[in-house]
Amino acid sequence: GQNIDQPTEMTATEGAIVQINCTYQTSGFNGLFWYQQHAGEAPTFLSYNVLDGLEEKGRFSSFLSRSKGYSYLLLKELQMKDSASYLCAVLDSNYQLIWGAGTKLIIKP
Amino acid sequence: GAVVSQHPSRVICKSGTSVKIECRSLDFQATTMFWYRQFPKQSLMLMATSNEGSKATYEQGVEKDKFLINHASLTLSTLTVTSAHPEDSSFYICSAREDSDYEQYFGPGTRLTVT
């Protein structure tokens, strides 16, 4: 079966750094997405990784290791507005997005 | 670019009535559109995938006669919840994808409340 695992909830302090991990087992792999979703709103795109390595985009970075079936999203200089759910999703061999359950990130002052 | 709109953003209807939700890609042609449902504190659940001009492909457990999907043009897909019941109350989100792109662009979602 297809499976994506990420922690249910994480807590971090404003100004700090947090890493949200995602492991996956899917039928085929055509890339991994990270989305941010604030409560009551639709997801917004953060990053897309299809090759191994680290992609940096401002305060957010995303890492992928295809051999390990592993990715992480790194958020630096945390701000209160970063409190949200972070969704990991893998594009499988049929180009269908397989979604993780999301990680709720709580930022404390 | 890549803007997707949904209408209405919120709707309240009585049990037994039908509700139509529209999803539009405003600045690109969406060959594929996806309909998701999300219950409070849960992740997105894919309901169906629709390709322009063909029948939608429904995920297991989703009743195709209850959730009617029409993707009549490259910029519009509609989801009709027929004979709605309180348990259909949820956040419905559509997304759209261009033929040449793997990324899904999400609409803002529709909050459906069935009383």
Image (cartoon, rainbow, N blue to C red):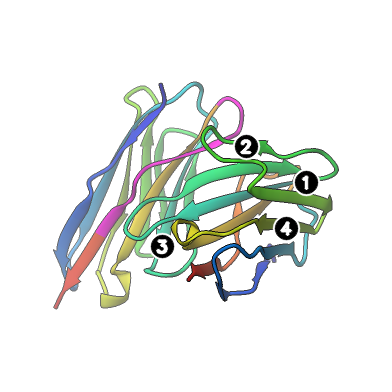
- Distance from disc 2 to disc 1, alpha carbons, whole Å, reads 17 Å
Relative to A6, B6 lies left or right: right
| CA distance separating discs 2 and 3 | 24 Å
Q: Residue at x 31, y 58 (%)?
A: B41
Of the image marks 4 and 1, the number of the one nearer the N terminus: 1
Reading the image, the residue beneath label 1 is: B31
Instruction: Name the residue nearer the viewer: A41 or B98.
Output: A41
Magenta residue check for A101: yes
Query: SS class of the residue under badge 2?
Result: strand
**Element under disc 4:** strand
Residue A74 % position (x, y): 29, 53
Q: Please tell me how crowded label 4 is: few (under 14), some (14-19), or many (20+) other residues with Cα within 10 Å.
A: many
Describe residue A14's horizontal placement relative to residue A102 as left or right: left
Which residue carries the number 2 mark? B58
User: The residue under label 3 is which amino acid type?
Assistant: Gln
Q: Nearer the viewer, residue B109 or A96?
A: B109
Q: Residues within 10 Å of mark 2 (few under 14, many from 20)?
A: some
Q: Residue at x 80, y 59 (%)?
A: B75
The spot of residue B13 in percent (x, y) is: 57, 72
- Where disc 1 sits, the SS reads loop
Numbered circle sitting on residue A37: 3
Residue at horizontal 85%, vertical 43%? B53
Quadrant of the rendered structure where residue B54 is?
top right
Q: Where B78 sits versus B103, above or below?
A: below
